[in-house]
Amino acid sequence: MFNNKRSFIIGLAGVLVFSAAKTEVEESYENQIQQISHLPLVSGDTITPEHLDGKLLLLNFWASYDAESRINNYNLLRLSENYQNTSFFNAQGLEVVSVSLDTYRSQLLKAIEADETQEFLHICDFQGTESEICRSFDIDRPVNLLVSTDGRVLARDYGVSLIEAALETLHENN
């Protein structure tokens, strides 16, 4: 059925998009990703295009008050360590962008420190699920999105198992 590994990966990536995304399989978040590249980080720095260009993005919508989000942070750290410098089909590396649904700065900063996720790119406007970024991605609760370089959602998961399976599939050295 598939002539080579690349054709297989393309086919499997299509299956992942079909099964993991919402009903709008072909929906692209390219404009939203471009908006992210200009948002201020919780640290006061700004995301630059170099942070995101050519990388798979793991958008981690989370909250410091949500126990499942906090557990997911441990797994996201592991994924980040394993895949941040990995060659993927049509991408080089993985960048975790944590978008907090918090409304209180002190709780968010304590959670980032306690979970040791300082290496992630943390965004928060302290508007909770009413924030512009949550609305633009149609997010109303914690969730993880694996997004391709062209803005397509490759996997959507409230945990990390689908995200990890997609990363392993897209890894070029399989």
Image (spheres, rainbow, N blue to C red):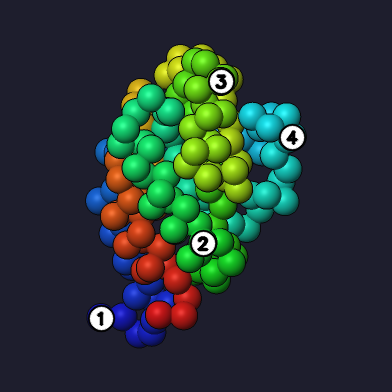
- The numbered mark, 3 or 1, whose residue comes first in the sequence reads 1
- Which type of secondary structure does the marked residue at label 1 adopt? loop
Give the quadrant of the N terminus.
bottom left
- Tell me the amino acid under the disc marked 2: Glu
Q: Which residue is tagged 1?
A: 1
Q: Assess disc 3: are there few (<14), some (14-19) or many (≥20) residues with their C-alpha within 10 Å of its C-alpha.
A: few
Q: CA distance from mark 1 to mark 2?
A: 34 Å
- Tell me the amino acid under the disc marked 4: Asp
Mark 2 and 3 residues: CB-CB less than 8 Å, in contact? no
Give the quadrant of the C terminus.
bottom left
- Which type of secondary structure does the marked residue at label 3 adopt? helix
Viewer-side residue, 19 vs 56: 56
Q: CA distance from mark 2 to mark 3?
A: 27 Å
Specify whether 49 is left or right of 136: right
- Which type of secondary structure does the marked residue at label 4 adopt? loop
Mark 3 and 4 residues: CB-CB less than 8 Å, in contact? no
Q: CA distance from mark 3 to mark 1?
A: 54 Å
Q: Which residue is tagged 2?
A: 81
Q: Is residue 166 visible?
A: yes
Is label 2 or label 3 in front?
3
Q: Position of residue 21 (x, y in %)?
A: 32, 44
Q: Which residue is tagged 4?
A: 45
Q: Quadrant of residue 32?
A: top right
- The residue lying at 33 percent from left, 51 percent from top is 160
